[in-house]
Image: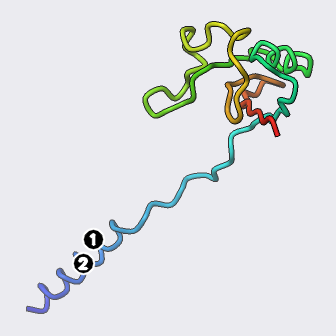
Amino acid sequence: MRFSAYAAALAAASLLSLAQPAAAAGSFAPAPAVHVHAAGLESQAQLAAQLSAQGYSNVALTSAEPSLANPHPELNPSESGNPAQTPVRDGWNGTAQKDGQTVQVYASHS
């Protein structure tokens, strides 16, 4: 009888330890971003030119917003086909690179 009580307590303790939330292996940091004031910028082509003048390269802008089904629309050529005709929108517009780091491109008109 004493053995079964000990085994039951050990089993309960083991199950409780499995139910504890897992600790994160590292810290989470926000994705690097560049925020651009878009006053006077009418198209994503103009935004790309401004970013290039500021030292950004590999500017990939898109007309589509990211979603669970399409998390990187800037990588799809059909989503970023005509930057001269695509207006800059408030919020996320795509990605760019600077100093070897990829950054998220955000714009605001206010």
Residue at image point 29% right, 72% down: 14
Kindly state the secondary structure of the residue where label 1 is placed.
helix
The residue wearing badge 2 is: 12
Q: Are marks 1 and 2 in contact (CB under 8 Å)?
A: yes
Q: Position of residue 33 (x, y in %)?
A: 75, 36
Image vertical order of residue 95 relative to residue 28, above or below: above
Which picture quadrant has residue 32?
top right
- Distance from disc 1 to disc 2, alpha carbons, whole Å, reads 5 Å
Q: Position of residue 75 (x, y in %)?
A: 58, 16
Which is more toward the observer, 5 or 17? 17
The residue wearing badge 1 is: 15
Quarter occupied by the C terminus? top right
Quarter occupied by the N terminus? bottom left
Kindly state the secondary structure of the residue where label 2 is placed.
helix
Image vertical order of residue 10 relative to residue 23, above or below: below
Which is more toward the observer, 31 or 9? 31
Which is more toward the observer, 104 or 25? 104
Left or right placement of residue 55 versus residue 106 in this view? right
